[in-house]
Image (cartoon, rainbow, N blue to C red):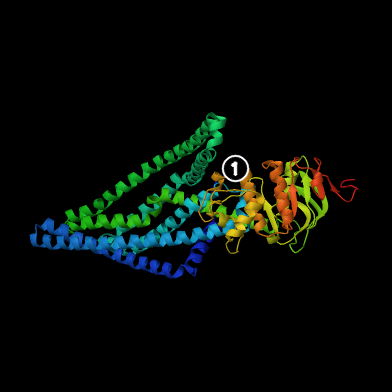
Amino acid sequence: MPEKKPAVTREILRRLGRVVWAFLRSKRMRGKAWFLLLGLLILMLVINGMNVLNSYVGRDFFSAIERRDSAGFALHAWRYVGVFAASTVVAVFFRYCEERLALLWREWQTQRVVRGYLNQHIYLHIKQTGSITNPDQRMTEDIRSLTTTSLSFLLMILNGTFTAISFSGVLWSISPILFGVAVLYAAIGSGLTILLGRPLIRLNYQQADREADFRSELISVHQEAEGLAFTRDEARMKERLGARIDQLVLNYRKIVAVNRNLNFFTNGYNYMIQLIPALFVAPMFIAGGVEFGVIGQATMAFATLVGAFSLIITQFQSISSYASVVTRLSELMDASESAALRNSRSCLGCSMDADRIVFSKLSLKASEKDDRILLADLDVTFDGKHSVLITGPNPAAKAALFHATAGLHDAGSGSIHRPPKEKLAFVLERPYLPAGSLREFLTPPDLPAIADHEILAILDDLGLVVPGSSERDFDTSRQWDDELNLAEGQLLAVARALLTKPDFILLDHLDAALDAEEFRRVRQVISRRGVAAVVFGNGKTSESDYDAVLEIHPDATWSWRERVITPDATSGG
């Protein structure tokens, strides 16, 4: 598969402009942002004024040395010290304002992106489609680079503009020809730099992914440390890590090679900046047309003016990295928009105002890119009074139905009519156990914290003892994944689901880790609380324990059996 070549298009730049404008207009940030931005502009003007003043003080200082004027030398030396001291103070405050504004922008941008990432299951859709690699890196390192580098480049462009205006007059007054040479020299240098350094944009983009892939593998070693040790699979993991290292090193070698060629040119370019003014002004001094200090002034003005026109040359490596950052974040935004669109149609023909779950002519495909039919023309109804077992030898079909009922699978056709989301609860085979206190974990979203007696009651019903429960310590934060085994985690997830007071609870292979007695107790607790259970089983539980059984066959057909009604109804004839 050919590697993707990033390109900073006009649309990406327009989007970047909209992001900047949104930041400056945001209610929370705009006061501070505009204050800091105005301060930066004022300080930038002051810095340029100090630089122009410094050029004239320097000219008079060296001319006094050439005339052997002791009094003039002392006077201009003190002026030099004063200009340097004032420039230092202004430069420090300028840098402080720049860093504060960059931090303010990063805070706003990161919060905005993270909120969007967690909305509408975008994180899940991006993971399922694999449309974006390493979204975590894009929301941390790339946003940091975007905000700091964007601001830095903006200030450099503005400063370069002010500098060009300020020092054009200085250099023109010394030699109009030298002014023309400066402009032409910067233009030719910029063109050659772009030609030599253009591959860096693509290589920096790829390097960011290589580094993130290597970091992901190291994280997986930490997360799966126990399994890795018991299976003695270190050799295979060394191979995987070694391959990641080889990939990032190979790509970085290409970056180093391009930088080498670019540095040959830029170093020579920068050295010539020191010589060219002297070649023009020294003959004027020798002929008696100017003072000796004018040579230093011309050198400073030429270097400053060329530097202002040579932003591409002096910052090309940063620009190439910045281009890859902008492209990667733009891809994240595109993927988020696509995921949001996909989420809006994830629930197939869905209405969420029913008091039961009704599947009408529901057909499910493996995915948008995989047209394999997992379930064909399902027509059944789960009411709130009966328990249902969903069984069959095809785990992919059961998983698709589980996700489709939750509104998280959109590959297929037909319709699903179901209760509102707050009336449905889902418990996964591998339960979601975020870090936090027991009370926080058990508290339903957007509701007051659960009281102690409710916590004790649900734990007692399920026969579950967790760290802190016997001491009624419900507010100490814990890493539940580390403190509970799989069965305990499943029971705790059931407790949380029941406390949301749903009409239906869907259990995904809960009988995989629970023994028969534990699973029977769970079913009894669910029944006593008046909740209808829909169990996605793995063949261990008896069909006789349920009011109805939905069996999904390997050929995507299905059969529905009720304990009271004896005839079978089989799809597909």
Amino acid marked by disc 1 = Asn
Q: Please state if 254 lies on the left or on the right of 98 as rendered.
A: right
| Foreground pick, 556 / 181 | 556
Image position, residue 332 (x, y; %): 56, 53
Instruction: Tell me: 445 left or right of 527.
Output: left
Q: Mark 1 points at which residue?
A: 485
Residue under the point 62% across and 52% down? 459
Q: In the image, what residue occupies the spot 37% across and 51% down? A: 314
Q: Where is residue 74 in the image (x, y as percent from the top left)?
A: 11, 61
Q: Decide: few, some or many residues near mark 1? Use Cα within 10 Å; few <14, some 14-19, many ≥20.
A: few
Q: In this view, does 546 lie to the left or right of 490?
A: right
Q: Is residue 367 above or below residue 231?
A: below
Quadrant in the picture for residue 240: top right
Q: Position of residue 58 (x, y in %)?
A: 20, 59
In front of the other: 423 or 331: 423
Q: Is residue 281 visible?
A: yes
Residue 419 location (% of width, % of height)? 74, 61
Observer-nearest of 127 and 274? 127
The N terminus sits in image quarter:
top right
- Residue 303 falls in which quadrant of the image? bottom left
Residue 509 visible in the shown view:
no
* For residue 394, above or below residue 524: above
Please count the marks in the image: 1
Residue for point 56% across, 35% down:
227
- Name the image quarter holding the C terminus: top right
Q: In this view, does 406 lie to the left or right of 465?
A: right
Q: Name the foreground residue: 182 vs 22.
A: 22
Which element carries disc 1, helix, strand or loop? loop
Residue at 57% from the left image edge and 45% from the top image edge? 484
